[in-house]
Amino acid sequence: MSFLRFATHTLRPVSVRYLSTNTGGSTKSSSNVPFYLGGAGLAGLATYVFLGGAGNASFSSSSPTKPKQTTSALDPERFLDLKLKAVEPYNHNTSRFVFELPGDGSGAALSPVTSLVVVRASEGTPGAPVDKKGKLAMRAYTPISRPEHEGEVVLLIKKYEQGVISKYVHEQLKPGDTLAVKGPIPKFPYKGTYACHTCFVSHVCFSTPIRTENEYEHVALIGGGSGITPLYQLLDNALRDPANKTRFTLLYANVSESDILLRDELAALERAHPHALRVVHTLDNPPAGWAGAKGYISRELISAHVPPAERGDKIKVVICGESLAAHFVFFFSNTHILLPPHFPIYPPPLLPSCAPPFALCANSENFVGGPGPPGQVNAIAGKKEGPKQGAVGGVLKELGYTEDQVFKF
């Protein structure tokens, strides 16, 4: 029974005898007010009964709130086969690879800022690349899609002629094929509103209690080549935080103008946040009329754009690039990554079961990266000591920066 019929049925008038003659007694003018008032009351009661009482949720005009996702659609402990949805060429040797996340398309990777994923060919794939021991080769990449991006994870992959995974992805992987992906795995812990802090063991995202807004007054990012991806991941998330007051300077080195990755995205961030971000491009082989810097990232370039070391704990220098010697070794089993000890970023009372994170610069054919070849990396910041940061060396040491002020991916 519809509500209209229900209410009409409830309000049927009582039988009334209409008389043409006076029945006797005193004459008194009649009034319909009591009937109208009673009818209104019955209509209200009918509405309440029809809707099932005050607690009926269907009475609400707003749709049910979507439950907040707390678990990544990926898994940091095991590889999941993700279907390649699209390949979007970026330049002469780099493309965006869009992968579908598992599930109904509403889940997100919830990648911590910053974090990476490890990829390899799916089991049983003909011609799958292998390492020197005959096992499936694995490489690490930093997603450029936002942590909360639903249904997809996007990787920006540069092709290297000697890179077994990058050549495999570029030359053999077609839309509809799958790639095995494990992650997200935390790296440098950016602390801010949009930073999702994930427990490695349970891979549950904790988005609010573990944070320190505006930990630094100024963060300098030094990057090279495809090593821009973790720096972009940090910038994109930090700058869209309405509470952000930190200033960022990016020194980004490339061989030629055509090698600059995420150029439009970086320019858009700089336009949207002119008081919070400054991007400085430098090229080894600049074209005629190039208005940016020229050559390697030098002492002069750093001195001109990075706040001095005398600013103490108010500044941080973060370094990442596309090529570095193997300072960091991964050990993989079928289902787990065995992590070397590093610094904890989660307060023990909040997340006592979380494995400690580790530092990586990922978006190349190495698991670890720095701004340019090893010699250039060492010249800027000094060597890493295995999984540890190592002493600050090179130009940054000459300029007075300390180990507390420098982070080497």
Image (cartoon, grey):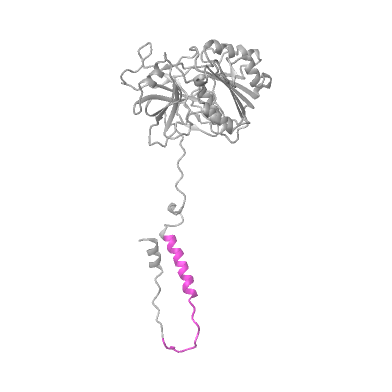
- Front residue of this view, candidates 349 and 121: 121
Residue 110's place in the image compared with 300, above or below, is below
Residue 56: quadrant of the picture:
bottom left
Residue 5: quadrant of the picture:
bottom left
Drawn side of residue 48 relative to residue 312, left or right: left
Q: Is residue 26 magenta?
A: yes
Residue 92's place in the image compared with 265, above or below, is above
Query: Which residue sits at x=38%, y=34%?
Result: 103
- Front residue of this view, candidates 101 and 90: 90
Residue 73 visible to an observer of this rendering: yes
- Front residue of this view, candidates 202 and 8: 8
Drawn side of residue 128 relative to residue 231, left or right: left
Q: State the residue lying farthest toward the right.
A: 310
Name the spot of residue 235 as percent of width and height, x first.
55, 28
Q: Does the magenta stretch include residue 280?
A: no
Name the spot of residue 115 as percent of width and height, x first.
49, 25
Q: In which quarter of the image is the N terminus?
A: bottom left
Residues in magenta, as a range: 20-49
Name the spot of residue 264 as percent of width and height, x first.
52, 28
Name the spot of residue 41 as percent of width and height, x first.
47, 67
Drawn side of residue 149 relative to residue 121, left or right: right
